[in-house]
Image (cartoon, helix red, strand yellow):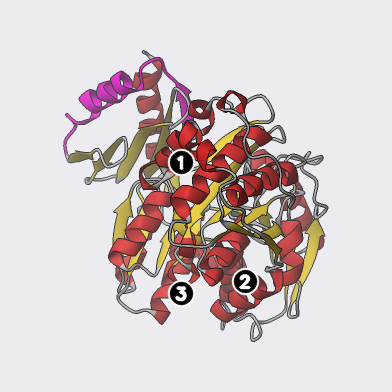
Amino acid sequence: MSSADAGCSLACVRDLEAIVKAYDIRGVVPDEFDEDTARALGRAAALVLAQESTAMVVGHDMRTSSPGLAEAFADGVTSVGVDVVDAGLTSTDQLYFASGALDLPGAMFTASHNPARYNGIKLCRAGAAPVGRDTGLAEIKKLAGSAAATERAGTATGRVERRDTLTDYAAHLHGLVDLTGIRPLTVVVDAGNGMAGHTVPAVLAKPPVTVVPMYFELDGTFPHHEANPIDPQTLVDLQAAVLERRADLGLAFDGDADRCFVVDENGAVVSPSTLTALIAVRELRRSPGAPVVHNLITSKAVPEIIAEHGGTPVRTRVGHSLIKQTMAETGAVFGGEHSGHFYFRDFWRADSGMLAAMHTLAALGGDAEGRPLSQLLAPYERYVASGEVNSTVADVDAAIEAVESVFAAEPDVTTDHLDGLTVQHSGEPMWWFNVRPSNTEPLLRLNVEAADRGTMERVRDDVLHVVRAR
C-alpha cells in the first residue's frame, strides 16, 4: 500500500451519518463512500482502536473498489504513526483470524452481501473483539469528521508490511474441526464470485472431501447472482447442481464468506436455526454444560436442544456485536443467529461461515449410521417458521404498539421487549412471533414460528393485517 497525502480537508469527507451504521460502515461508492472518506476513517480508527497496539491489520474483498479504499484507509492509519499489516485479499473471517492470531485491531473492506455498487468496513479491536456503535464506532465517526485527527496526520509515519495469512488460517480451522477421519463426501460450493472462491480451495478441497466449484472466479460485479444466500433466489443454481451431481450437500457463502447456508441432498435449504442446534450439540460434547448463545429469532427448538444436551441457552438481541459481547460475558462456547452467522469461542468469539461448513461436513461424514443430511438433521427440525417478512410502515413504534395491544390480551400469552416485541403463546398449539424495526430503513421485520403450518400462517397473517393496516 502506498503513502498518500493524509491532509485532505474535512470538505473531502462524505456524509458520515449516512454510512456509519450500528455495526459497520457501508455505502454506495463513490456517491456516499470514497477514498478520501476511507483515509479520514483510517486516521480515526487508528487513533481509537490502536491506542494499545503499534499496528492494524487491513484486508479487503474482491469488489472493484476495495483495493483503492483499503489503500486509502491504510494511508490514513500510517499518517498518524501506526503501522499496517496488509493482509490483501481475505474473507472476513480470515481477517478476524489475523486480528486474533496477531492480537491487532483490524479493518475489513467489504459490503458483504450488498450489490456491487456498495462497499464498507467491518472493524474489530485486537483479538477480533467487536466494534459497534456503542463500542468505538460512534467515536470513530466523530473523530473522522473533526479537525483533531487531521491535525495529527504527518506527525509520524507508520510502515506497511504485506502478510499472507491464508495458509495459517486454514491450518487453524483444521485444528478446530478435524475432517480427516470422515467418510468421503461430495459437496457443491457456490461461492457467488465472492471470497469463498479464495478460501474454499485452501480449506475444504482436500480428501476425503470432493468440492464441486460454482462461481469461484473472484468478480465484484457478481455476474451470476448476488452473493446473498439468505435470498432463496440466489440458491436456485446450487440446488439444481446438488441434484444433478447427486452430491451429499451444497454450501453457499455470501460475498465476504462470513455466512454459510446449507442445502441437503434433496436440494432443500437447511434452516440456520437447525445448523445452530447441530453445531451447539457438537460444541457441547467438547465443553459439557457450557452456555450457548442464540438470538431471539432462532427456532424455539434451539434452546430446547441446548438444554437437552446439558448446555445453558442464553437468549440475546440480533446483531454480531451483541452476540460477541454476550459470549464474552457468559463464557459461551458457541453462538448462532438465524441469519446464518455462527460464532465460536475458540475463534476469538468471531463468526465464521467456513467453520460452520466444516462442522456440517464433520457431522455428516462422521455419522456412524451413514445417514444422508436430511435424516441426520431431522431431529433438530421441530417447528414451522415463516422466514423473515418485511413491511414498510410510516411509524414503526406505533405499529409495534398496535400489535402488542391486539395480541397481549390473548390467553396464555407473554410479551417482552428484548429486541422489538416478542409475543409467545404457551398453550396449544404453540406459537410465537417477533416484530422488530430495521436499523436502517422504515421497515418492520416479522418472524413467526408455530407447531404446525396452519397455525404459523394464521398468526403471520393476523400480525401482518395489524401492521399493514396503518
> Residue 361 got which mark?
2
Q: Quadrant of residue 206?
A: bottom right
Assign a secondary structure to mark 2: helix
Q: Which residue is mark 3?
A: 282
- Which residue: 39% across, 54% down? 323
Label 2 and label 1: CA atoms lie apart by: 40 Å
Q: Which residues are magenta?
A: 388-411
Q: Is 378 situated above or below 257?
A: below
- Which residue: 42% across, 46% down? 319
356 relative position to 289: left or right: right
Q: Which residue is mark 1?
A: 140
Amino acid, disc 3: Arg
Amino acid, disc 1: Ile
Residue 57 visible at all:
yes
Earlier residue among tags 3 and 2: 3
Label 1 and label 3: CA atoms lie apart by: 38 Å
Residue 318 among magenta residues:
no
- In the rendered image, the residue lying farthest to the front is 155
- Mark 3 in CB contact with mark 2 (< 8 angstroms): no
